[in-house]
């Protein structure tokens, strides 16, 4: 299932998309997997999470995520 980011211009991402990214990341999905789900790079997902919610995001170690 491929989802699309509600981001088109000016690097704007809707609050609901950010909330969904945070939720999925905290459930253990890797940045790479989230990028695949939304059709963007894992680096862009990381930038979105860091920019929009640095205090709400709990980044799991990639080794822990890989084990999930």
Image: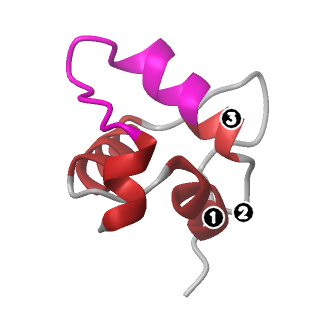
Residue at numbered disc 3: 44
24 is higher (above) or lower (below) than 13: below
52 is higher (above) or lower (below) than 19: above
Residue at numbered disc 2: 39
Q: Are marks 2 and 3 in contact (CB under 8 Å)?
A: no
Residue at the extreme bottom of the image, as rendered: 1
Q: Residues within 10 Å of mark 3 (few under 14, many from 20)?
A: some
Q: Quadrant of the C terminus?
A: bottom left
For label 2, the SS is: loop
Q: Are marks 1 and 2 in contact (CB under 8 Å)?
A: yes
Q: Residues within 10 Å of mark 1 (few under 14, many from 20)?
A: few
Residue at numbered disc 1: 4
Q: In the rendered structure, which segment of residues is drawn in magenta?
A: 46-61
Residue 2 as seen in the image, left or right of residue 19:
right
Q: Quadrant of residue 10?
A: top right
Query: Which mark is drawn over residue 27?
Result: none
């Amino acid at each position: 299932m491929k989802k699309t980011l509600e981001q088109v211009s000016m690097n704007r991402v809707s609050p609901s998309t950010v909330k969904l990214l945070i939720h999925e990341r905290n459930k253990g999905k890797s940045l790479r997997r989230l990028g695949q789900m939304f059709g963007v790079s894992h680096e862009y997902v990381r930038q979105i999470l860091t920019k929009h919610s640095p205090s709400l995001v709990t980044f799991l170690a990639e080794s822990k995520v890989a084990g999930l």
